[in-house]
Image (cartoon, grey):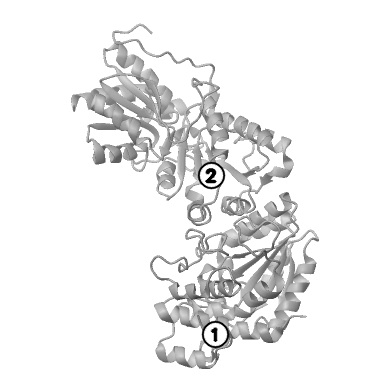
Amino acid sequence: MEGLGRLMKKYTDTGKKDTRSGFGDGLTELGKKNKDVVALCADLTGSLKMDEFKDNHPERFFQVGIAEANMIGIAAGMTIGGKIPFTGTFANFSTGRVYDQIRQSIAYSGKNVKICASHAGITLGEDGATHQILEDIGLMKMLPGMTVINTCDYNQTKAATIAIADFEGPVYLRFGRPKVANFTPADQNFQIGKAVQLQEGIDVTIIATGHLVWEALQAAETLNENGITADVINIHTIKPLDDEAILKSVKKTGCVITAEEHNFLGGLGESVARVLATHHPAPQEFVATQDTFGESGTPEQLMDKYGLNASAIVNAVKKVIARK
Amino acid sequence: MADYKALEDLVVQVRRDILRQVHKVNSGHPGGSLGCTEFFVALYNELMERNENFTMNGIGEDLFFLSNGHISPVFYSVLARAGYFPVEELNTFRLLNSRLQGHPTTHEGLPGVRIASGSLGQGISASIGAALTKKLNKDKHLIYTLCGDGELQEGQNWEAIMYAAGNNVDNLIVTVDLNGQQIDGATKNVLPLGNLKAKFKAFGWDVMDIEKGNDLKAIVSGMKKAKEKTGNGKPVCVLLHTVMGNGVDFMMHTHDWHGKAPNDQQLETALSQNPVTLGDY
């Protein structure tokens, strides 16, 4: 895009895809290459895109029924003897519903379980607030030893799914339901805990995670047309956080926007604020939900109503630059 | 044929270990520990096939999971006296920087413990997981689990009980410590468990009783029968009828000593009823 600002990196949406399909396809690939990978699902095999793994490896697929607490416990037990369990259900039922089971049987026990959570955030859509969760990042990042990953598109979710099998320790992998832009490289080398710099700028840092990463790129283009250049950073790993990448950028730009499909309490934004408060205080604005439950609606309507899109990011940038 | 004299001596020594552990730190759970002492001694010394060196994965050996983690004093004593760690370490029970946490955990790397427990209702699920992995690994060994009776009030157990039967997890023996007591009183007064035997049966388990749950011979023969029931398509449940506080007269048949340590005088009385056999730590 021709703008008033500097030349930007170009990102192309290669066709809208859901991140949960990235998980399903990643799991299929893992099933073929790692015999220790087992998968468990609580009656949402289709929604989690786990059918292919199930068909390819029925002996390594465990349907536990609508019993998430038991699923978490079984997964923890299956690690004893060397299996690498991947559990699949909605984010709400992967976290809040089974928090104590995760806490004691997985996190405190240091078990190598991958908790894979689809339909995270508000973009679950029409089912409404009972099924949407905007608190899960906070819940999971507070657990000692838990790695928390929130991927931004199909390709990244697939790469992350494959990568976490080789990582020893409990992981929470968060992804979503709607079809969104697929723009990261298919052959990316997914590195847990390593931020991805998507755009270079000098006026503001935009740190985004999950579905908000694409929105951040759109916002950066709009800003560029207005002569504001933004560092855009994709934080797929919220814990451990890439403090170095954040500090390097904010030291250059002097202000930051965090953008996430999550409550502003307990999310990525607060993690970034902690890093800045400790090492390099700077003005920050939070693009996130404002301590509220979601509601029914289409994903686009909800992202608009709750201020979780490119235009919300642009507005937040203007606000934060004024505070510099 | 088991050497019952040796096992009896171990039981008495383990009772002393339990009492001395909780007395020293004035905290812990002697009642349930004493009630399950004979079971633990029989399990670790007569029933389970165990490898010499502890590994988390426990390939090629039977595994034990304690769901009601608060009876850690008996677990620790039996593990130590089976050689998993030095018996002197029982001195550190519940102290700062100890591997012998109030409730068992893998966090401090204590050999013999494979998962944290204490928050109740999670042990059967974890045991099922370990049992499924045994099957995937073509490892013919068994999973033994102990849970409390009051603990069965936690709903997760029934998810697990339904799963195990529905999926033929038949390399699993879950023993229920049926002492009829919980913190607030008798289970029948707190929340009646109803007919547990009928419940397990209705869920599709092979269920049996060990009526004399504090009798070593009855435990050994009963658990051997339970072992024979494995591998037949059904998970096995043993209802172990125990007396809370067994072996110390004033601690028996009451929930009062669920989570209370004896004072100096009470300890002396309790120990006098269980004279040293193998030697105190």
Q: Which amino acid does label 2 sit on?
A: Glu
Give the label, 1 or 2, closer to the camera.
Answer: 1
Looking at the rendering, which quadrant does residue B203 occupy?
A: bottom right
Q: Do the residues labelled 1 and 2 touch (CB within 8 Å)?
A: no
Residue shown at the point (35%, 34%) measured from the top left: A288
Whether residue A301 appears in this view of the structure is yes
Q: Where is residue B254 in the image (x, y as percent from the top left)?
A: 52, 84
- In screen coordinates, is B229 left or right of A93? right
Secondary structure found at label 1: loop
Q: Which residue lies furthest to the top in this view?
A: A2
Residue shown at the point (48%, 72%) measured from the top left: B89
Q: Residue B99 carries which label?
A: none
Q: Which amino acid does label 1 sit on?
A: Gly
Q: In this view, does A73 lie above or below A13?
A: below
Residue shown at the point (70%, 84%) measured from the top left: B4
Q: Is residue A275 above or below residue B166?
A: above
Residue shown at the point (43%, 23%) measured from the top left: A214
From mark 1 to mark 2, how far is it between C-alphas? 42 Å
| Placement of the N terminus of chain A among the 4 image quadrants | top left
Q: Where is residue B119 in the image (x, y as percent from the top left)?
A: 50, 63
Q: Which mark is residue B279?
A: 1
- Which residue bears the numbered disc 2? A168
Q: In this view, does A217 lie above or below B1?
A: above
Between residues A253 and A226, which one lies in front from this camera angle? A253
Between residues A7 and A122, which one lies in front from this camera angle? A7
The chain letter for the residue carrying disc 2 is A
Q: Position of residue B114 (x, y in %)?
A: 57, 60
Quick one: label 1, few (<14), some, or many (20+) residues within 10 Å?
Answer: few
Secondary structure found at label 2: loop
